[in-house]
Amino acid sequence: MTSKAKISAIKTLLENRLPDLLDDAGLDDFDEYLDKSTIKSTDNEIAVYIDFESDSGEIATFSAIIQVQLHKKDEIADYHDIIYPFLQKYLTGAVVDMMQRESLDADIYPLDRNGSNSFAFYAVSFTSVIDDCFYDDFDDDDDESGSA
């Protein structure tokens, strides 16, 4: 699964499940669910974008940021109380085709001084052990040089 596909899968999970949970809690749904980091400063939006990706040869790591922005609302803690447990339960490694979720961290920023936006940032990291069985099919016994 490509990085873009992983981001899209996370966005789809949020987009399909969060509206009902927010409604049940008496909170407004987001104006937009985005799979990029471009957020309009005047909307209530949730965006998913890549943080980093690495391949050490033994472990593959993929990390994403989920950014929540509320415009002129100071209910970020109420949203966090819905979103964080949701992510803990449903944002598993299987969503992004990886073995496991390694970590989930949250940073909350209440309404800023001029009263325009409040934010929550969720950093989620996934890992998989790299399967090198493919390379085991190539052994030195097939060496055509005649040496064993």
Image: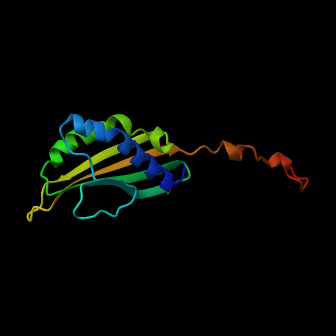
Compared with 57, 116 (above or below) is below
Q: Position of residue 137 (x, y in %)?
A: 75, 43
> Which image quadrant for residue 87?
top left
Residue at image point 49% right, 56% down: 4
Residue at image point 40% right, 56% down: 35
| Residue at the far right in the pictured view | 146
Front residue (pair 99, 3)? 3
Residue at image point 83% right, 46% down: 141
Q: Position of residue 93 (x, y in %)?
A: 45, 40
Q: How is the image coloured?
A: rainbow
Front residue (pair 58, 116)? 116
In this picture, residue 107 sits left or right of residue 56? left
Compared with 124, 52 (above or below) is below
| Residue at the far left in the pictured view | 113
- Give the number of callouts: 0
Q: Position of residue 65 (x, y in %)?
A: 34, 54
Q: Is residue 136 visible?
A: yes
Front residue (pair 121, 16)? 16
Front residue (pair 126, 131)? 126
> Which image quadrant for residue 26?
top left
Q: Is residue 87 visible?
A: no
Q: Position of residue 113 (x, y in %)?
A: 8, 63
In this picture, residue 112 sits left or right of residue 85? left
